Image (cartoon, helix red, strand yellow):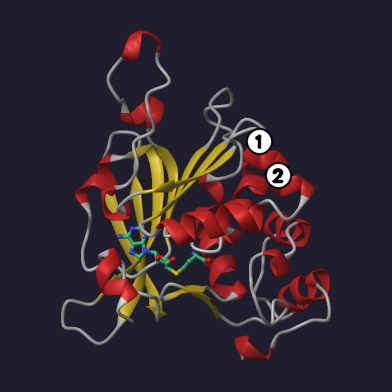
Amino acid sequence: MAWRCSGGTNEELIRNMASKGLIKNDDVKEAFIKVDRAHYAPNFAYEDSPQTIGYGATISAPHMHASALEYLLPFIKPSTTHPGRPRRILDVGSGSGYLCHVMAELAGDDSKVVGIEHIQGLVDLGRDNMARSPAGRSLLDSERVRFVLGDGRKGWKEPTSAEGGAEWDAERDGWDAIHVGAASKGWHQELLDQLRRPGRMFIPVEDPRGGWQDIWVVDKDEEGGIEKRKLFGVRYVPLTDAEEQLKR
Ligand code: SAH
């Protein structure tokens, strides 16, 4: 069982997870080893379990982060088909900031990771947690990772990098990978629109009949075609309004 996995150190936790098959990919394993979960999880950092982080939010269990990373990996690792094009990754509901750090480790030097939160305290928490390590501080200083405030259901449009203030463009300014860390009530068109071609989104979605959620992987192909695949049942915090969440 996933929750039985633990370790005395970060590296021990990750190696135990790998030996139990909860982390399958070596790049993912190495990236996890580089990021000390104790900087992001307030308690029991080296246990494979979710932990509350305040504001009605949780840091997900490491095996859920591993699964998300392994599904998104072809869109996080430096691209082989577009070698000159640095990765752009959006983490909706970045919470503790942990996954942003691991994704930045995987994505390589020129990549950009944006974590979006709808509660200022969680924007600050992600940034403060990341600042606890020299590697994290360097990601923040170089702006390879940024934490921003906004409603993640609408995605995030960075101010355009183009000269002369050109319009936002999905191919240049959109995302190779979108990770959604909270359960959505439906498909948010703006998130799909902001995926690059090709691009992939990993998203927990509430079943319309209520009562449960499933992880879906949504692929956008080179022509802009969308394909959705349902993977497995999960239990996430809802993707909602800030006021609703703070009532929890
Ligand atoms: N992935 C993070 C947090 C998971 S908890 C981690 O593992 O640390 C889900 C997060 O989604 C919470 O932090 C919550 O504040 C955020 N969230 C919920 N609805 C949101 C919305 N509409 N926009 C942005 N973030 C949202």
**Tag 1 near tag 2, CB within 8 Å:** yes
- Secondary structure state at the residue bearing disc 1: helix
Amino acid type assigned to the residue bearing label 1 in the image? Asp
At horizontal 77% and vertical 56% (from top left) the residue drawn is 34
- Ligand 1 shows up in the quarter that is bottom left
User: Residue 115 location, x and y as percent?
Assistant: 48, 50
- Secondary structure state at the residue bearing disc 2: helix
Query: Which residue bears the numbered disc 2?
Result: 137
Depth order, front residue of 235/120: 120
Query: Which residue bears the numbered disc 1?
Result: 141
- Is residue 130 shown above or below 61? above
Query: Quadrant of the image for the N terminus?
Result: bottom right
At horizontal 63% and vertical 41% (from top left) the residue drawn is 140
| Label 1 within 8 A of ligand 1 by Cβ | no
User: Residue 185 location, x and y as percent?
Assistant: 22, 68
Depth order, front residue of 197/115: 115
